[in-house]
Amino acid sequence: MPAVTADPYPFPFDPKACALLVIDMQRDFLEPGGFGAALGNDVSHLRRAIEPNRRLLAAWRAAGLPVLHTREGHAPDLADLPAAKHRRAQGDVLRIGDVGPMGRILVQGEPGHALIPELAALPGETVIDKPGKGAFHATGLQASLEQLGVRQLVVTGVTTEICVQSTVREANDRGYDCLVPSDCTASYFPEFHAAALQMIAAQGGILGWVSHSDHLLKTLSDL
Ligand code: C5J
């Protein structure tokens, strides 16, 4: 089995059972005028992860391995939006469902809900719509992975400490091995990004592995 050389120990990469899971690379998080910006965040921090994801996606697709994407968002009637999630924001800001520059914030079918064009899903790739932060909650993700025979996940996307980390925690409890390439994730808060990655890899990989995508690209090119 090839390994991804991640410090301090290698990820036991099994190309027959590993999928790339790209979390929430949506216009609402990465472009001005979306949900992230409405909450007062500087989206440029997240945009650093676009090019590493583009490179990894290209190599992953070339290797013929499965790719899944997620999108955080809610039905137009907001029936799947818990009041607690709706309420939580600081000050007088646009909230989920309000009309912003890219349509209704974090609502399915609106321009801001779409994946950014640089990382759009190809025909045949699974796109999971999720109402929560973790990608397993109230979605068909687990069924899709079981159908594909996937037991390992390379998890990328945004944001490191919210939806990426929530998904890694959910996946870990369901028995999946997870690798997070550090440069393919990002946070509006660089210190949260660093801390979240440390939490995943600490204590001998209590939640999974963290590496740089260069190691993964090398492993993929050697397949
Ligand atoms: C957030 C996410 N941060 N995709 N969503 O609300 O991390």
Image (tube, helix red, strand yellow):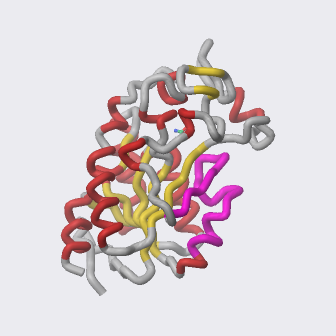
Q: Residue at x 59, y 47 (%)?
A: 133
- Whether the magenta-drawn stretch holds residue 140 is answered as yes
Q: Residue at x 33, y 79 (%)?
A: 12
Q: Which residue appears farthest toward the top when viewing the image? A: 92
Q: Which residue appears farthest toward the front when viewing the image? A: 123
Q: Is residue 35 visible?
A: yes
Q: Quadrant of the C terminus?
A: bottom left
- Horizontal side of 33 relative to 63 (left or right) equals right
- Horizontal side of 43 relative to 93 (left or right) equals left
Please provide percent x and percent y for residue 72.
59, 44
Please provide percent x and percent y for residue 183.
28, 50
Image quadrant where residue 113 sits: top right
Q: Quadrant of the N terminus?
A: bottom left
- Compared with residue 28, is residue 99 higher up or lower down, i.e. above or below? above
Q: Is residue 207 visible?
A: no
Q: Residue at x 36, y 45 (%)?
A: 118
Residue nearer the viewer, 8 or 111 = 111
Q: Which residues are magenta?
A: 125-145
Please provide percent x and percent y for residue 150.
50, 77
